[in-house]
Amino acid sequence: MAKTILVVDDKAAMRTLVRDHLTVENFRVVTANNGRDALFVARAEKPDLILLDIMMPEMSGYEFLQAYRKERNTPVILLTAKLEESDKVLGLELGADDYVTKPFSLRELVARIRAVLRRMDQETPTQVLRVADIVLDPHEHTVKVNERAVRLTPSEFELLATLMSAPGHVFSRAALLERLQGIAFESIERTVDVHIRNLRAKIEPQPSEPRYIETVFGVGYRFRTED
């Protein structure tokens, strides 16, 4: 069955360009011209992935993310004309999984979409991961901390699963970034830092003094082994 992609952009020409190209690539495409309309379309269509412009009237991409992340964890790739790193980081902090800077190559866009969807559809390990007080079930795509269910975005779930799969092993930011994207895209390694910060806010008793995810300065991150 064809995957459904929701394209959200206030420029009709951009929506048409992306829609037509993705249709040729065998995706089912639905569109919206602002964040407010996108909420209605997303609720009705339940897309497999959302391509989201940031600067839009009525409801921006940032505002859409804030609202939609309370409902679903659908992967989101930002389509941004802004070049400032702070703008990209803000989108990641609000729950985006990746970003593509306009103008972008349609070939690269498709590659990024397929990388995210492949990560979502990849065969999951058979075992449930249990480390310290955290239980991660790859089949149910659920995480519990001290029996409390925690909702994670796809990127946060993938990072946690990677770290928990090898407690004590130090993963570099570059390795984690490649794990998230599935392909060597040009990106900022701070992307990983933002996802880790979001993850800590959800699973750590005190995010400022992390118990589970330890920073190895100058290298990357590891899941702390039990004492």
Image: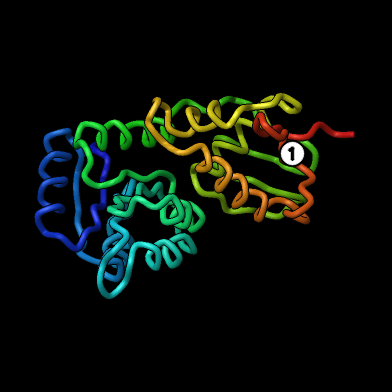
Residue furthest bottom as drawn: 58
Tell me if residue 103 can be seen: yes
Q: Residue at x 44, y 28 (%)?
A: 122
The quadrant of the rendering that contains the N terminus is top left
The residue to which callout 1 is attached is 214
What colouring does the structure picture have? rainbow
Tell me if residue 129 can be seen: no
Q: Residue at x 29, y 63 (%)?
A: 55
Residue 220 image point, x, y percent: 65, 32
The quadrant of the rendering that contains the C terminus is top right
From the viewer's perspective, is residue 33 above or below residue 14? below
Q: Secondary structure at mark 1?
A: strand
From the viewer's perspective, is residue 112 above or below residue 30? above
Residue 174 image point, x, y percent: 53, 28
Residue 100: image quadrant is top left
Residue 209 image point, x, y percent: 79, 51
Q: Amino acid at mark 1?
A: Glu
Residue 143 image point, x, y percent: 63, 45
On the rendered structure, is 213 left or right of 143? right
Residue furthest front as drawn: 84
Q: Residue at x 67, y 34 (%)?
A: 221
Q: Residue at x 16, y 45 (%)?
A: 18
On the rendered structure, is 115 left or right of 5? right
On the rendered structure, is 22 left or right of 152? left
Report the label total. Answer: 1
The crowd level at tag 1 (other Cα within 10 Å; few <14, some 14-19, many 20+) is: some
| Frontmost residue, 14 versus 227 | 14
